[in-house]
Image (cartoon, rainbow, N blue to C red):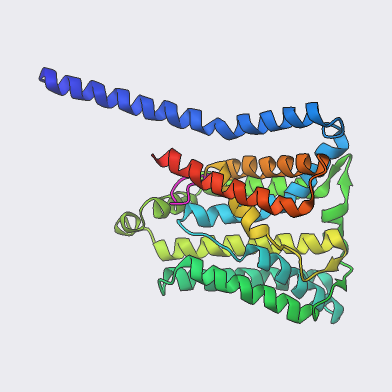
Amino acid sequence: MTKLDMDMKTAGVSLSRARSLNSQLTDLVLPLALLALIVFGMTSFPSFGTAGNLLNILTFSSILLIVAVGETFVVIGRGVDLSVGSMVGLSGAVMGILILDGWHPLIAAVAALVLGCLIGYVHGLLVARLRISFLIVTLGSFSILRSQAQVLLEGQSKTVSMPVMEALATGRIGPVPNLVFVAVIVYAVSVVVLRCTGYGRALYAVGSSPEAARLAGIPSARVTIIAFCISAGTAAFAGLLTVGSLGSAQTTAGTGMEMAALSAVLLGGTRFSGGFGSATRTLFGVLFLGVLNSILYAAGVSSFWQGTASGLVLIAAVALDRTRKD
């Protein structure tokens, strides 16, 4: 081996180490920012650090975590599902109407979940088979699903009694709400699927390079379709929990959740270009948004400004994603 070869090899190793160190430092940005935000909240607002408020943050973040975890699968696979907020509203409306029509509550809940997965399947088919942009498909579905929720509920809230969902959404085990445990279970399952299954590895491969995945024998279309089914299914499940929490099916349920979920996913570090990310990163993103909204509320900031904060966080998340790639 010549001296030039040795120098090039050494330079390559140094560059690889530098990139690895830069990636590790970047991964610490959000956890450290979350910690700083919590410290700021505790020192600035006495009520922020109380056990009750911290449990409230976890409770209100639970529904978003369930939706965002499903969104993570689609983003890793190089896509986006902009219909998840409307899916939350539609699934709750479907379950509510079926229960009011005399269906058994459990059968109505299963029917709403199946409908959600079927809609996700259609999204996946349109994107993977017909090659229609995921933005067009899910943006169109965003309007369709919200409209159908309003049609089913006739533009008004419907009081619904669903004991199982009410227990999951409002019950407690000790001081901790059941909803937190449900969200943790969904998160844990997603971690296992992404890290320990062949599907998880295939999803990362498709997100990194669909063509390379196809040449490697991975059924890219099927992987994409399943990702959209997971996203729609988790959003539908979140819709059922929302009905259990509110005690009614509402036309406004899930409004704005698509942007909050996408913000949490990208803020956590899952790359918009696909092939990189995790449920744990999304968890940090969700917690950051939950803590931020709690601080804004404690500071007396109008709830109307929370949309502005979420929008700024989304832009910052995409900008951070660009710096990671660069």
Q: Main secondary structure of the magenta part?
A: loop
Tell whether position 101 is magenta: no
Residue 270 position in % (x across, y down): 51, 46
Q: Residue sitting at 81 percent across and 39 percent down?
A: 299
71 on left or right of 292:
left
Query: The N terminus is located in which quarter?
Result: top left
Find residue 9 and report its image quarter.
Answer: top left
Q: Total marks drawn? A: 0
Q: Nearer the viewer, residue 323 or 125?
A: 323
Q: Residue sitting at 77 percent across and 39 percent down?
A: 295
Find residue 297 and report its image quarter.
Answer: top right
Magenta segment boundaries in residue numbering? 270-277
Residue 206 position in % (x across, y down): 40, 55
Query: The C terminus is located in which quarter?
Result: top left
Residue 43 position in % (x across, y down): 79, 26
Q: Residue sitting at 43 percent across and 72 percent down?
A: 132
- Residue 91 in view here: yes
Residue 46 position in % (x across, y down): 86, 30
Q: Residue sitting at 62 percent across and 52 percent down?
A: 311
114 on left or right of 201:
right
